[in-house]
Each structure stands twice: as C-alpha cells, then as structure tokens.
Amino acid sequence: MLEILVLLFGLSLLFASVTNMLSSLIRILMAQGLILFAITLLKTTQLNWFSFSFIALETLIFKAIIIPWFISDTIRKNQTHREVEASVSNFFSLAIMSFIFVFSFALAVYSQTRSTKLFPLEFGIAFATILKGIFIIIANKKLITHLVGYLILENGVFLLSLSAGSHLPYIVNLGVSMDIMISIMIAVLFINRIKSTFDDADSPTTLKE
Amino acid sequence: MPWLLFVYPFLAAIVVLTIKQQKNLDKLIIVHAVLQLGVGIAGYLNRSYLAHMDNLGLLVFLITSTLYLAVALYRFGTEPNAPIKNYRIHTICLMFFVAAMDGACLAQDLGLIWIFVEATTLASAMLISFEHYKSSLEAAWKYLFICSVGIALAFVGILLLVIAQPEYASLNVDNMVAGVKHISPFWLKMAFVFIMVGFGTKIGLAPLHFWLPDAHSEAPAPISALLSGALLNTALIPVLRINKLMQAAGLGALAQQVYLFMGFLSIFIAAVFILKSQNYKRVLAYSSIENMGIIMLAFGAGGTAIYAGHLHILGHSLIKAAFFLTAGNIVSIYHDKQWRNVSGLLENNKPSGWLWLIAFAFIIGMPPSPLFYSEFKIATALIQNGHYFGFTAFMILLAIIAWAIGRVSLQITMGTGTQATRLKKGMIIAPAMLLVLAAIIGVWLPVLNLP
C-alpha cells in the first residue's frame, strides 16, 4: 500500500512535466497533499488525538485544500494567463525529469548500503521531488509557477522527513509546518501587492543590472 | 536572563498597538536596543547570564547589539514618510527581526538555529518592502523567495544529518561531536553540501547571491545596515558550527576546500559586478558579498587565519553598517541612488562627507581598520599553506574592488556642492560611533582574544 502511494506521488511529478495548464499544476498539488496525508496515516503507529489533528491540519487542510485554493483564487483575481509558459519544451522537461529519477534512484540504491533506517523508494522519490521543484523554479518565468515549484520542493522535503524515520526531533516538524504556513501567507500577500503596484503580476522587472 | 530578549518584543508589540506618535515608537526601539546591549555585556562578564553561549555566538550577539543601538539612535526622530499604521508594523517587525537573530546566537541545536534563521527572513522581508516603492517590493519578493528555497535546502541538509546518525539522533553540535564515531561519513558529506548551499544563500555567497544586492540596496538605510552587518553573521553561525563537526569526523580538508572555493567565487563575482553598478548602495552590497567571501577564505585557510576570520566578521560588521548609514544620509540629501548624479558631499554636508571617506578607507583595509590586520593574516595563511595562485588572485581581486569603491567615493564626496544641508545629530553620531569603535578595535587587538 505504502509503495503504491509513493509511486503515485512519483507519477504526479511526471505529469507535472507534461502539463501546460496552471490549473492542472494546482490539481497536482492537491493530489500530492492527499497522498502525503495517506502516507503519514499509514506510518504513524500509535495515533493519539493531538498528533492526528496536527498531521491532518498540515497535510489535508493546508497542503491539499487551503493552499491550492489560495493560489487558484489569486490566479482568478489577477487574471493571470492560464498557461504555464515554461521556457523549455515539454519533451525537454520530461527528459530532465527522467534523468532526475535515474539519478535519485541510483543515489537511493547506493545509499541503502550506508544506512539501515532508510526506505530507498521513498528516499528516491523524495529526492526527485526536491530536484523537480528546483527545476520548475529555474525553467519558468511566472511568479505563480515559481510558487508552485517551491511548494513541490516543500512536499519533497516533507516526504524526505517521513523517510528519515521516526527519530526526528519534534521541534523540527513544528518548524516545517510553521515555515509552510507563514511563507504562503506572505507569498499571497506579496503577489496581491505586486499586482496592485505593478500592472502585471506575472513578472516584475525593474531591478535589472 | 535570555528570556528577557524574547519577552520584551512580545510585550512591546502589544504596547505598540496603543501608541499614536512615531516618536514613542522610536523610544520603544531604543529601550529594546539598550536592554539588548546590557544583556550582551552582562553575558560577556559572566557567561551564565546568557545560557552559557559559546564564543562565536557571543561575538555575533555583541555585534548585533551594538549595531542595533546605533541604528536605533540613527532612526530616532526621522521624518515620517509613511502612515502611522505602517510604521507600527515596521516597529514590530524590527523587534522580532532582532529577537530572531538573538535566538540564532543562543541556540546550540542546528534545528533550532534553522527555525530562527527562517524567522529572520520572514521579519526582514516586511522591513525591506517598507517604503512600498515598486523596486523595494520586488527586492523583498526576490529576497523572500530565494532565501526560502535556500533555507529549504538547508533543512534537507539537517534531515540528512539525522539520517547520518544510527540510533539516537541529536542535532546539538556538541553532542554530535561527542558521538562522531557513529556518524556515517557519506551522509555527513551530503548534509554538509546541502547546509553549505542552503545557509550560503542566506550569507550571500556566490552562486546564490542574487537577492543580496537588490535587498540591501532597496531597503531603508537602517535596515540595510542591520541586514549587512548583523544578519549575514547570523547565517554564518550554522556554517561555522558544522565545520567543528566536519573537523571532528576527519573531513576537515573537504570542508576547507569547499570554503575556499565558495570564498574565491564570491570575491570574483563581487569584483566583476561591482564595476558595473550604477547605484552606490549596490556597490556597498557587492562589497558585503566580497567580505563574506574573505571570511570563508579565512576559515578555509585554517590555522592562524581562523582568529583573523573572527576579527574580520567584527570589523566588517561595524564598518559596513556605518557605511550604509552614511549612504542613508546621502539618499536623504540628494534623493538619488545613482552615484554619477551625486557630487560635492563634502561641501553640502561636511560630516557625512568625512564619514563616507573614512568608511571607504576602512573597508578597503587601511590601518587602523581591523580589516587591515585580518586581511594581512589571511594572506599570510594562504602563502603558508602553499596557495600561491590563490594569494595572487586574492590580491588582484581586492585591488579591483578597492578601485571600484574608491571611484564611487571620490565622485560622491568631491566636486562643487549645490547647497549646504543640515542633518539630524543622530544621523552623524551613529555611524561615527561605529567607526570610532572599529578604529579602537583595530589598534587594540588583544581585547578580542576570542578563539
């Protein structure tokens, strides 16, 4: 079951490389949030009320509902053009994604011999997700797409923290969720303000030197 | 006593909401700064007051406190250029920004440091965009975004550190050093690379420095001074702490090579871009990148240069903050940030002109600047370790940067002035105080006998 979910997560990355519409990128974010919620539920052995509500708040409410809604709302309000407008072709980004997968799995298989507490499949996919997030940020010009790339990167970090096992200090977990919440709030605030200051929220360009 | 540093901003934030005059808001900041410096001095005299902070943390803490006091004096009673509502938010963000930096100095746990460094990003992004110009808004966005990505990568590094430890995972550097035998070198190396790239973004090391010139040049002058003089040091703390672990694990040579590489790359990038800059605050920002590069070189060279590295952190912070504050004076006299449009500062406002010239002499390492001694030591260490090529490149790049800053400084200060302008006393005293302090330290080195 766990393997299937993780594979689905990896599949969503491939889908993100071929899509041209902003709305489908947002749907991918929602799907990833749901998958992360399911994975966390499977992994938590003893579930008390507090940890359940914490996990649900972070993955289900924030990652799968509020943030995608925020972004699509921002797109609608700012009347952003609905296509992704990547600076590379779909084929190229799919090829890059395949390379990322090959690299991440090679690393995961290699690393399996070095550490006993690691799940190679999860580690590989998590690493690929982080690299994919960076690639989306590099290969796109729009602010909104940058934000989506950052969120995918954060999802990767979350998956990595799950694959690192249960030894994680609690405060670190708290930090991650704080980070995500606040940065999204500010990002949305900023995009709205950029919109009202610049006529075009797509790509502000006054600082060039 | 450390709790005072965190309780005060929260209490003051509640008080701020009831205050209607800008002057009273400024007074709250001054009280915070005095409190901060007081705690810092008490901690210097007796370490138990500051939760047994280590030397590096104490050094950064004292620098932050000094700069904060100077900045508080500088901005006291400046003309309000924003509605009081915005000014209140600005005051609250400033206090939380400083409190987050204190937290990063106090924390020994890498995870906790990470959270505080993240908090500084959030607070300071609001500070940068305070003036609501198009360019400052864009700079703040760039800063927030690039640093968030960087800090996420640093978190990956911290997770890899957890993976590197077999059973019981701790993120406290001292505990990790004690249990270094059990740490897997492969994962430690991976973690080191991610932590370097992640926190390196925040330090402004090339190749992830893009946000720094924009953020430092578009922020209001007092904020630029704090960003450059205090925040960059705060981001240095985790990078230098992990060095201790790398040395203990027998991977010190690798860490030093990475430091040397990133240091040289940063100085090179700074030297290339500083020649193209039209904006004098950007020139200062590139100089910050250069100095961070020099500090990385010091820790890369190792040995006696490590002392020089700590001295360079101190000297650069004091001088660069004074420089940025003086740049704020120029902006308020000329309302122009292009250096070719500005001339005759010595005739328009003599004290600012002299401050600018002295800060210029100090930043390029003329005695009695502390940077003279530290750069001399670093150059010596490079030769002793056989980095002859590195030494030559270091000298040439420093000369290029000195020429570029000199060109800008002479253009700004010399020439005929248009009209004499008077500035508030605080705007002169604050940078002067920092420069005098730097000169005293430069002459009286033994005071700093920190390891």
Image (tube, grey):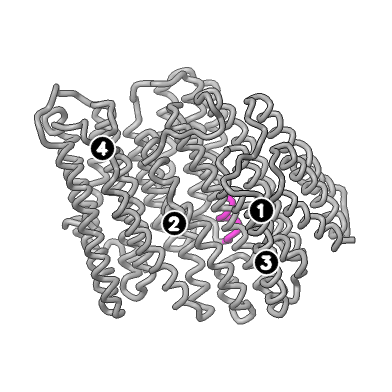
Looking at the image, residue B326 sits to the left or right of residue A156; the answer is: left
Earlier in the chain: of badge 2 and badge 4, it is 2
Mark 3 on the same chain as mark 4: no
Residue B32 to residue B311: above or below: above
Q: Which residues are magenta?
A: B109-115
Viewport quadrant of the C terminus of chain B: bottom left
| Front-lying residue, B104 or A90 | A90
Mark whose residue sits in front, 1 or 2: 1
Dividing the picture into quarters, in which one does residue B190 lie?
Answer: bottom right
Mark whose residue sits in front, 2 or 4: 2
Q: Does the residue at mark 1 contact the one at mark 2 (Cβ under 8 Å)?
A: no
Task: Please report, as a chain letter, where disc 4 is located.
Answer: B
Magenta-highlighted stretch: main secondary structure? helix
Q: Secondary structure at mark 4?
A: helix
* Magenta segment includes B319: no
Identify which residue is drawn at 53% across, 42% down: B144
Asked whether the viewer can see residue B424, the reply is yes
Mark 1 on the same chain as mark 4: no
The residue type indicated by label 2 comes to: Pro
Dividing the picture into quarters, in which one does residue A87 lie?
Answer: top right
Q: Position of residue B39 (x, y in %)?
A: 44, 48
Mark 2 Cα-neighbour bin, 10 Å: few <14, some 14–19, many ≥20: few
Q: Does the residue at mark 2 contact the one at mark 4 (Cβ under 8 Å)?
A: no
